[in-house]
Image (cartoon, rainbow, N blue to C red):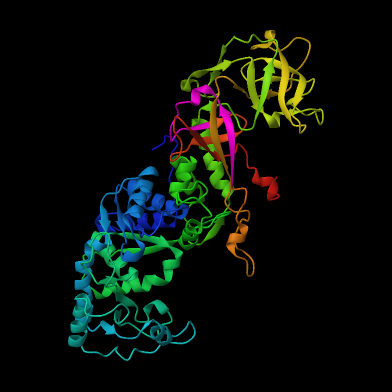
Amino acid sequence: MSTREPAAASNFIRQIIDEDLAQGRNDGRVATRFPPEPNGYLHLGHAKSICLNFGIARDYQGTCNLRFDDTNPEKENLEFIESIKADVRWLGFEWTNLYYASDYFEQLYEYAEELIRAGKAYVCDLNTEQMREYRGTLTEPGRNSPYRDRTVEENLDLFRRMRAGEFEDGERVLRAKIDMASPNINLRDPTLYRIRRGAVHHQTGEAWPIYPMYDYTHTLSDAQEGITHSLCTLEFEDHRPLYNWFLENLDVPCQPRQYEFGRLNLEYTVLSKRKLTELVTEGHVDGWDDPRMPTLAGIRRRGFPPEALRDFCARIGVTKSDGMVEMAMLENSVREHLDTTAPRAMAVLSPLKVVIENYPEDRVERMTAANHPKDESMGARQLPFTRELYIDQADFMEVAPNKKYKRLALDGEVRLRNAYVIHCHEAVKNADGEVVELRCTYDAETLGANPEGRKVKGVIHWVSASHGVPAEIRLYDRLFNAPMPGAGKDRDWRQDLNPESLVVVRGIVEASLSKVSAPAVFQFEREGYFCVDSRDSSTERLVFNRTITLRDTWAKIAGKD
């Protein structure tokens, strides 16, 4: 963990835990869990839940399990499981125990038979459309299934035959017998088991032709693991009565309590797993770990530090209501962390050659540059200075637009960072009238000193033409142009995709970066923070991803400047 780890702020969940401990509940234990379904990659919303569950376990000397709620074999696989493990560890946490809901399949089946024997569950032959019709609406009660009054013996027989694989998918389900007139639709005889004969489970193979439903599995898995505080997002608030019903009607080893907190909604992105899947399958991004994706794999590849993400989660806090969080909050956490930890380097993203005509052709000077302006412990590096250099095209204009202009202009001067003052006397153009080379002179008396009798306002970065290293530089930006993608009547969220979310340029980086590898992150001076790409970069082909700009470039666009 970082030494800058934010102190845990009190919230309503921590207050509940404090009260439980003061009252001696749960034998003084605090046990949480993080229970993702392995049907996709984790995203920023999951990071909030990870930090909450694992953070509580850490701060209260409790336990936190990682449990895969793997009851939907058609959509789950080992790739997602391994990615989730990597994400939790990258965020800085380690689970007490690793479990799968499938570990409990036999026990869950026994619980189902227990409900049948108690007259609290039955096998129903209604198909999906009929069940929807019988369920009723928010304003109208449902109707009892015609199969609701089957005898215990008949239900046990049918349920055992379901397990034996005698019936086709969708032919029968097992339902809890609760109340079809309940105002809470979740209590209108919810399904407990459905048939999935052809499914191959990543843990149990073909052993089970029936699979338990999420609500049933989730509750009883919590009970099996001795969870004391089952923390979930607000969309499960209406499911809590069902959660409690299972605990009250079965002989379980523990009585966990469910508490709901507001989920993370973040501007300029989507956190719906369905939409994230569509971004990948429709080719809008290059996989789940595309650096524009809000997946933890994506932001890790983009260079976001885990410490910054934990800081962000601490800043937004835990509340009882959903809310929209400004993207700037996340980006500020990233900038603040990288400002103190990222070493500096020089890179020219749009190279323009400079020839210093009065500098010896065969001379190479080694200019000393601090790796960090505020942290001497990071040391220094040597920058080769030669007759031919590259500066960025944006740092030259033939005619200075105004007196505030602090870059290089024709017949103007500028200081090269950590080096000399140069004067430009000629701009060489190609046949299209584009400036392709600058002819300059340097003032040999200005290394570490100001020129006499005149004031040079600007300082720009540079790279030696003979020592610089070519690099592919990917300028990533927000994936969407709109704070709330798809907001508005009949508007598809895809319409708000940002066509400039990725711009690729061929740049030149200083020689000290020739051997760097992922996950190294640098501040390219005057440009932003960049990381070595973990998938595509190599010593033969350097690839850098822009993690974030030095300033919030979206503030002016959004009218916040």
- The answer to whether residue 479 is above or below residue 302 is below
User: Residue at 22% across / 84% down in the picture?
Assistant: 155
In x, y percent, where is residue 340?
51, 31
Does the magenta-highlighted stretch encompass residue 514?
Answer: yes
- The answer to whether residue 82 is above or below residue 135 is above
In x, y percent, where is residue 85?
33, 49
> Relative to 457, is 206 on the left or the right?
left
Does the magenta-highlighted stretch encompass residue 182?
Answer: no
Using the image as rendered, state which of residue 292 and residue 235 is in the foreground.
Answer: 292
- Which quadrant of the structure image shows residue 25? bottom left
In x, y percent, where is residue 283?
51, 55
Q: Quadrant of the C terminus?
A: top right
Is any atom of residue 420 visible in this view? yes
- Which quadrant of the structure image shows residue 117? bottom left
Residue reaching furthest to the front: 431
> Relative to 178, is 260 on the left or the right?
right
> Relative to 49, is 162 on the left or the right?
left
Magenta extent: 502-522
- The answer to whether residue 1 is above or below residue 380 is below
In x, y percent, where is residue 183?
43, 81
